[in-house]
Image (cartoon, rainbow, N blue to C red):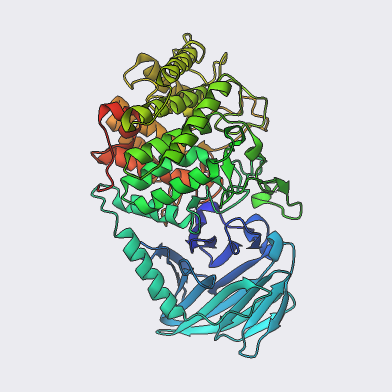
């Protein structure tokens, strides 16, 4: 059985990532890309679906941390006979994809064991395992080849590789697992000590770019490192999470593949990176966004693959029992075919914020934006699936309409501020029409708040963003009423639901955890409204949910008091960074986004 979600830590190399449990077991790894088939899939099944454990034979007290501000994980096992530390990492942007594990004797003597069970195809296919002349073990299946090199004597026992060894103080035993296509020559060995030094130097240099004076600098740096680890280096695309099918409700069916790049995350991700000073990553993300959005506006998707791939066909793995029997296990995501009007606003806002932040753009970018606005003019009044990708019937979601307004508004501001050619009178009329429609149909005078969809009385956490995107000022009574209504109806034990799944038909069985990004949005709304004490208190509660190495999943089960959903979740960490900046920096993302060009609140590439 897999560990609790919060008992995992992340290691990665800019191409993919692995989850390492507190028990020394790597239970999830897709090679060579985030979206490749897993070769360790115990996370969604049992050890027989693939894992690699190194741990003491005897019971141990376990502590762990990352080495400074890096993605190098150190897990220390203290047994009755001694102490040993395992150092786990993946060399960043490697010539040879690899997982390096160094076992270091710290005190006394500790009997150790390793068990290596490799299963390609998400735990379905066992490889042919053989021993090489130098004592290494090779595992091959179809296009994939993995080589395990170590000084420990390994025993191949059918489909398993086992090893037993003893560690004394001062000893270091390396294990290096490398991946290569099976049709190519075997890759040369990696020097684990050199790889460790290079990886540590990479992270030291990268995090040194960030100068954060605030109270929560440690939490912010860890979140930024996590975001960096979720960037697919060749393209700049940012995966929502490195996992699939970790349930939003334990034992339930809300299990989705998050190893893709969502447009809904675009603006908030861009601002988190720019405000932190990571303009190279922000620029690469913007370029990925432009490439993905290129083409006919009518064919714009809500999400794409790591390189902008369009087809993300969803299917189910019936041989995996799922995390804690949460079925089905899904690969791909059918939401890529959904209509979501809000993504047009996200793309337009992200490109506008990037331009304001000093990231260069050209006339061709503006031509794309003009085409997107022309399409929004045709479709804004149609129902859609909404930001949360419901699998029920389309509705006229208030947030979708607001983001259509954002798309037009940012186009107008772009033309006004940067001198681009545009039919401004036509766009201003369209912006006014959409705004009036939302205020007339999306606001419920009985509840005193905006509502989830036209004609409904239900609430939705996305409504908290109305002031942030500049649709109405934060001191507007309708915004105040919306925030208060969301607090009354969606707050559960101090954290926020996206919406009430018991009362809303989203095409799925009811039940999910509190959505962490939405809880951060509430803190941001408090900042805009001047409720700073409430914002600080909520932010502190959210920080307390991080696991021992500072990571957050998508959601939190307030009853089981456990993290749920895919892990670690980029959206949660983006939200953490932005809320920390809102609470402690002079340049606040909520104000930057809502102000607009005419209010002279700008970002500077020199910040």
In the rendered image, residue 411, in percent from the top left (x then y), is placed at: 42, 28
Up/down of 547 relative to 401, above or below: below
Up/down of 13 relative to 147, above or below: above
In the rendered image, residue 128, in percent from the top left (x then y), is placed at: 74, 76
Q: Nearer the viewer, residue 80 or 475?
A: 475
Residue shown at the point (39%, 73%) measured from the top left: 198
In the rendered image, residue 50, in percent from the top left (x then y), is placed at: 66, 65
Quadrant in the rendering for residue 302: top right
Q: Nearer the viewer, residue 237 or 247?
A: 237
The residue sitting at the bottom extreme is 133
Confirm whether residue 571 shows in the render. Answer: yes
In the rendered image, residue 286, in percent from the top left (x then y), is placed at: 44, 45
Residue shown at the point (50%, 59%) measured from the top left: 234
Side (left or right) of 530 relative to 438: left
Q: How many marks?
A: 0
The N terminus - image quarter? bottom right
Q: Nearer the viewer, residue 471 or 457?
A: 471
Quadrant in the rendering for residue 272: top left
Up/down of 81 relative to 422, above or below: below
Confirm whether residue 498 shows in the render. Answer: no
Q: Nearer the viewer, residue 117 or 378?
A: 378
């Amino acid at each position: 059985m897999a560990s609790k979600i919060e008992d995992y830590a992340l290691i990665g190399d800019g191409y993919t990532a692995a989850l390492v449990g507190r028990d020394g077991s790597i239970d999830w790894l897709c090679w060579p890309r985030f979206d490749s088939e897993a070769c360790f899939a115990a996370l969604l099944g049992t050890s027989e679906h693939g894992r690699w454990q190194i741990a003491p034979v005897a019971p141990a007290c376990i502590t762990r941390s990352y080495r400074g501000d890096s993605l190098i994980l150190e897990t220390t096992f203290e047994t009755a006979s001694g102490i040993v530390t395992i150092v786990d990492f993946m060399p960043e942007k490697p010539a040879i994809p690899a997982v390096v594990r160094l076992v270091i004797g710290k005190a006394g003597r500790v009997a150790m064991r390793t068990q290596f069970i490799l299963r390609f195809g998400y735990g379905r296919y066992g490889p042919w395992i053989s021993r090489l002349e130098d004592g290494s073990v090779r595992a091959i299946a179809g296009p994939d080849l993995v080589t395990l090199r170590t000084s420990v004597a390994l025993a191949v026992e059918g489909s398993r590789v086992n090893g037993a060894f003893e560690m004394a103080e001062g000893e270091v035993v390396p294990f290096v697992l490398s991946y290569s296509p099976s049709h190519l020559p075997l890759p040369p060995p990696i020097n684990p000590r050199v790889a460790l030094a290079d990886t540590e130097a990479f992270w030291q240099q990268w995090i040194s770019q960030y100068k954060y004076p605030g109270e929560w600098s440690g939490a912010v740096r860890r979140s930024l490192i996590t975001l960096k680890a979720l960037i697919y280096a060749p393209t700049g695309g940012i995966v929502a999470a490195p996992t699939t099918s970790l349930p939003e409700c334990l034992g339930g069916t809300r299990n989705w593949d998050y190893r893709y790049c969502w447009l809904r995350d675009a603006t908030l991700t861009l601002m988190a990176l720019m405000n932190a000073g990571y303009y190279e990553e922000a620029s690469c993300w913007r370029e990925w966004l432009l490439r993905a959005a290129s083409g006919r506006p009518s064919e714009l998707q809500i999400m794409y693959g790591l390189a902008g791939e369009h087809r993300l066909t969803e299917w189910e793995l019936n041989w995996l029992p799922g995390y804690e029997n949460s079925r089905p296990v899904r690969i791909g995501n059918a939401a890529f075919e959904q209509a979501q009007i809000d993504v047009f606003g996200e793309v337009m806002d992200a490109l506008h914020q990037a331009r304001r932040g000093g990231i260069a753009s050209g006339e061709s970018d503006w031509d794309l934006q003009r085409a997107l606005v022309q399409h929004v003019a045709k479709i804004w009044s149609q129902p859609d699936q909404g930001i949360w990708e419901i699998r029920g019937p389309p509705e006229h979601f208030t947030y979708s309409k607001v983001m259509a307004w954002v798309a037009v508004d940012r186009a107008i501001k772009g033309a006004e501020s940067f001198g681009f050619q545009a039919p401004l009178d036509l766009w201003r009329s369209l912006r006014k029409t959409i705004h009036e429609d939302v205020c007339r149909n999306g606001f419920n005078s009985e509840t005193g708040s905006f509502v989830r969809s036209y004609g409904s009385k239900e609430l939705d956490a996305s409504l908290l963003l109305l002031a942030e995107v500049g649709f109405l000022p934060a001191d507007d009574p309708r915004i105040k009423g919306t925030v208060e209504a969301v607090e009354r109806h969606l707050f559960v034990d101090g954290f926020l639901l996206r919406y009430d799944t018991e009362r809303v038909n989203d095409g799925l069985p009811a039940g999910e955890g509190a959505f962490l990004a939405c809880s951060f949005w509430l803190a941001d709304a408090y900042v805009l409204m001047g409720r700073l004490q409430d914002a600080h208190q909520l932010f502190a509660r959210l920080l307390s949910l991080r696991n021992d190495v500072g990571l957050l999943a998508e959601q939190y089960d307030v009853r089981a008091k456990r993290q749920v959903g895919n892990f670690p979740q980029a959206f949660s960490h983006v939200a953490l960074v932005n809320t920390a900046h809102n609470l402690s920096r002079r340049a606040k993302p909520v104000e930057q986004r809502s102000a607009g060009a005419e209010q002279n609140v700008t970002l500077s590439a020199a910040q």
